[in-house]
Image: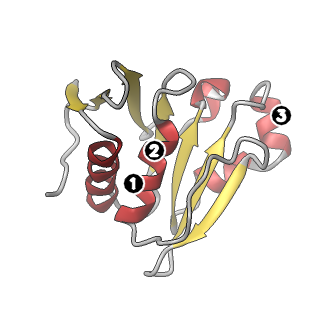
Amino acid sequence: MNVIETHSYEETELLAARIARSLNKGAVIALFGDLGAGKTVFSRGFARGLGITEPVSSPTFTIVQEYPCPDGAMLYHLDLYRIDNSDAALAFGVDEFLYDKNAYCLLEWPERIPDLLPPETIRITIEHIAEECRRLTLPSDMKIQD
């Protein structure tokens, strides 16, 4: 695994933006971490890396936020915290977001639907280690653009 520490919210956002620019459409990114770990900060940076300029917030109550990318792709930002299980996720059509090849799918609380995650899902763990410091664990084979 590749472990990177960031020391401010800005560093976390910049790393997420670099990761976004490194991925192709169709990517599914699963963000693991406790409440307050920094998943939404990461998501905001990820969106910026795709060229999205509108405000990005956690979709905790709406479950999914959809953001158009300048290149015509979509970013689907899902927060599955309020989803009980895979059956509940399928009931709202989570599979349409997970398998859209013209989109990026960013999942918070993916542990709610482990059996539905595509095999190529990119798993990132975010840990809160100090006020603004985070430890991100990325797949060891992940290439990140500068």
Q: Identify the image quadrant of the N terminus.
A: top left
Query: Residue flagged by tag 2: what amino acid is it?
Result: Val
Residue 120 x/y as whole percent: 42, 41
User: Which image quadrant is residue 47 in?
Assistant: bottom left
Residue at numbered disc 3: 88
Residue 100, relative to residue 11: is it above or below? below
Q: Residue at x 71, y 41 (%)?
A: 60
Judged by depth in the image, the label closer to the viewer, 1 or 3, is: 1
Quadrant in which residue 131 is drawn? top left
| Mark 2 or mark 3: whose residue is earlier in sequence | 2
Q: What kind of residue is marked 3? A: Ala
Nearest the eye: 49 or 86 = 49
Check residue 41 in the rendering and tell me which mark sits there, or answer none. 2
State the CA–CA distance, disc 2 to disc 3.
Answer: 26 Å
Q: Is residue 1 left or right of residue 131?
A: left
Q: Nearer the viewer, residue 49 or 8?
A: 8
Instruction: Mark 1 and mark 2 in contact? Answer it, CB < 8 Å.
Output: yes
The tag on residue 45 is 1
Residue situated in front as seen by the camera: 78 or 121: 78
